[in-house]
Image (tube, rainbow, N blue to C red):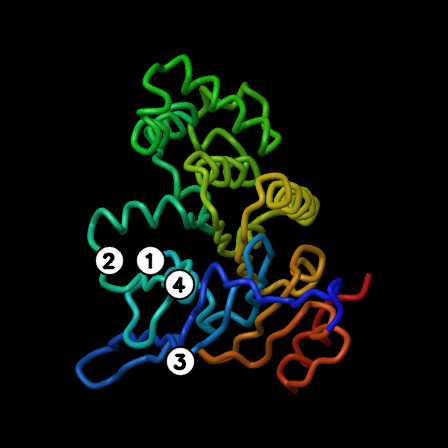
Amino acid sequence: MSDSATVSIPATPIISVKEASVIFSEGKSKVKLAVNTVSFNVEAKKILGIVGTSGCGKTTLARAIAGIQPLSSGDILFDGNSIRNMSRTERIQYSRKVQLVFQDTLGALNPRMTICDALDEVLKVHRKAEMPSKEKRLAEIKLLLDKVELPESVLNCYPHEISGGQRQRIGIARALAVKPQVLIADEPISALDVSVQAQIIKMLAHLIAEEKMTMLFIAHDLAAVRCLCDNIIVMNAGKIEEMGSCNEVYTSPKSKFTRELLAAIPSI
């Protein structure tokens, strides 16, 4: 080997999911295997799309990675450390590093709080030492609004007074407020108009690059995933049907299920 030769050392994935399963009880004897022995890695500063039909387990998997849904078996590692059986302090620290943006924009926000108060509350809880005064927090809130491309006029509005697209942007701003390393977006565009969906996708792509974050983008819209993601996982009935780079999966799908999903994408 010449002196100029270099050895490529694989980077440690920021998240490793190892044979993770989630089982829900449905009565005395029935159980539902929502996630079935799933394993994969998430590369740092990349966007991973997780797609599949409704009920395939992608939202349950997202909640498990976020630390909200306990695993029935298997493990999830963050920077090489297991998130199972974390202490209360460790769980709080983890929730700052991995933020979940919910699909239900109205239900995710307190209807009795203005947008300004909702964002201020996050900063007071998670960054009070850094921003002890209301003036500093307000300045940060205005920066967050700028990042998600919203006018300051929304600050005095209540959630029901703004559109679904604006609420989703506020949900993203609230997640960004704690400076996470990983953003998990669970069907963030499914309830929005097509034109608004395109705006949100463009904004997310810009944010991930600018903030140098990692993102898991959960969706059933394969066209949106192709526009946004580096890699993709296709789920079916709680299992991984296929995974790889977006280019590989979209141009040479190996699974019949994946081919059927791709065939269902509308042609424009």
Q: CA distance from mark 1 to mark 3?
A: 17 Å
Q: CA distance from mark 2 to mark 4?
A: 14 Å
Residue in the image at 34% along x and 50% along y: 94
On screen, residue 31 versus residue 155, left or right, reads: left
Amino acid under disc 1: Gly
Q: Do the residues bearing badges 1 and 3 touch, measured as CB atoms within 8 Å? A: no
Residue denoted by label 2: 86
Q: Secondary structure at mark 1?
A: loop
On screen, residue 199 versus residue 15, left or right, reads: right
Q: CA distance from mark 1 to mark 2?
A: 9 Å
Q: Secondary structure at mark 3?
A: strand
Q: Which mark is residue 67?
A: 1
Quadrant of residue 20 in the image?
bottom left
Question: Which of pointers 3 and 4 lies earlier in the amino acid sequence?
Answer: 3
Amino acid under disc 4: Gly
Quadrant of residue 63 in the image?
bottom left
Residue in the image at 47% along x and 23% along y: 140
Q: Which mark is residue 36?
A: 3
Q: CA distance from mark 1 to mark 4?
A: 15 Å
> Farthest residue toward the front?
3
Question: Which of pointers 1 and 3 lies earlier in the amino acid sequence?
Answer: 3
Q: Do the residues bearing badges 1 and 2 touch, measured as CB atoms within 8 Å? A: yes
Question: Which of pointers 1 and 4 lies earlier in the amino acid sequence?
Answer: 1
Q: Secondary structure at mark 2?
A: loop
Label 4: how many Cα within 10 Å (few below 14, some 14–19, many 20+): few
Q: CA distance from mark 2 to mark 3?
A: 22 Å
Quadrant of residue 231 in the image?
bottom right
Whether residue 227 is situated above or below residue 41 in the rendered picture:
above
Q: Which mark is residue 80?
A: 4
Amino acid under disc 3: Asn
Label 1: how many Cα within 10 Å (few below 14, some 14–19, many 20+): many
Question: Which of pointers 2 and 3 lies earlier in the amino acid sequence?
Answer: 3
